[in-house]
Image (tube, helix red, strand yellow):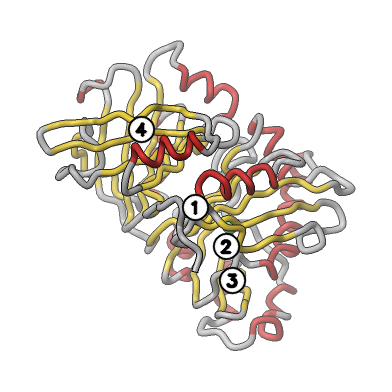
Amino acid sequence: MLQDNFPIRKVDHIRHYVGNARQSAYFYRSIFGFDMTMYHGLETGLKHEVDYLLEQNDVKLLFTAPVRPGHPIAEALAIHGDFVQDIAFEVDDVDWSFHEAVRRGAKPAREPFSLKNDEGEVRLASIHIYGDTIHTFLNRDNFKGHFLPGFRERFEPGVGIGIQEIDHCVGNVALGQMNVWVKWYEDILGFKNIISFDDNDISTDYTSLMSKVMASGNGRVKFPINEPAPGKKKSQIDEYLEFFGGPGVQHVALRTDDIIDTVKKLKAKGMEFLRVPKTYYEMLSDRVGDIDEDIEVLSELGILVDRDDEGYLLQIFTKPITDRPTLFYEIINRKGATSFGKGNFKALFESIEREQEVRGTL
Ligand code: FE2
């Protein structure tokens, strides 16, 4: 068996830079049912920005906004709009992780440092990845408190919708850059390429893309990386790169154990999803065989199904959650399948193209 040459325990949290963290917190609490749990801002000694932590089971989302003019975060927001800025990992040894990653070629973002209070110490350091995105390494083995020193409890419960954990995070990079980043994750973080899709797998009459799925040594962290492939019209990846202003995180997949319940609750709160044509469901049982769910219910909700050697999965994609056609979410329910829904790509991309057509960006 291959050795894990860069131990990562799991994704600890995802940090979003946003224009108004209070309103983002409200959105994620009321629509996705996250609990607001911790706060750090002017009232707790932070002078230039504000942080809200939202949680549901194993998912931690951090929302950070600048509160003064001329803040560097505001410059990044002016370019990208609200975006995923940090996919933070929990690791055994922050200092080793940072120095080893830099030795292997990573660009440093923040040298190792400690946050301390009377509950102990959390060690952190960060490296750059594509665009304005970073990976933070953190370890709170010597911290008895919750999340990070400096944060104060501010509990405003949401009504959970069954989101369990982050299943995967997808990055969009420019043409020709996918393999650069595949190699980066291999060389620096010891990830392995577990699945590849080329433009024959993922193409419609108009657009295509290529994708490679990278997984960490313990298999718990999965990052597909997409690049556009030449097509007759502008691909969804090109649209993203144009509106985002470079490479960045395209979607975050949240895992649930009951996708029908989760999606019903999201819809009741007004979340909008991509739709595939009704004909998708006419062919479904031929394609995926027996499944536990009622196809009629899946069809009503627009939930997609795919099967691989190990089982099947159910998935659905939201429309972009920002004004720009950039970040969206996937809700995924795995019933044994470890893959990413290749059988749904075509129907899905035709659905995205219909949206692009309405936006005039196809
Ligand atoms: Fe996905």
Residue at mark 4: 22
Give SS at disc 4. helix
Q: Which mark is residue 316?
A: 2
Q: Do the residues labelled 2 and 4 touch (CB within 8 Å)?
A: no
Give SS at disc 1. loop
- Is disc 3's CB within 8 Å of ligand 1? no
Give left or right: position of 216 versus 178. Answer: left
Give SS at disc 3. helix
Q: Quarter containing ligand 1? A: bottom right
- How many residues crowd around disc 4 within 10 Å: few (fewer than 14), some, or many (20 or more)? some
Q: Residue furthest right?
A: 232
Q: Which mark is residue 300?
A: 3
Q: How far apart are marks 1 and 2 (CA)?
A: 15 Å
Closest to the camera, between mark 4 and mark 1, is 4
- Is disc 2's CB within 8 Å of ligand 1? no
Give the mark nearer the N terminus: 1 vs 2. 1
Q: Nearer the viewer, residue 313 or 322?
A: 313
- How many residues crowd around disc 3 within 10 Å: few (fewer than 14), some, or many (20 or more)? few
Give left or right: position of 97 versus 195. Answer: left
The residue shown at (48%, 63%) is 263
Q: How far apart are marks 3 and 1 (CA)?
A: 15 Å
Give the mark nearer the N terminus: 3 vs 1. 1
Q: Which residue lies furthest to the bottom in this view?
A: 290
Q: Is residue 268 above or below residue 147?
A: below
Residue at mark 1: 270
Give the mark nearer the N terminus: 3 vs 4. 4
User: Picture quarter containing residue 122?
Assistant: top left
User: Identity of the amino acid at label 3?
Assistant: Glu
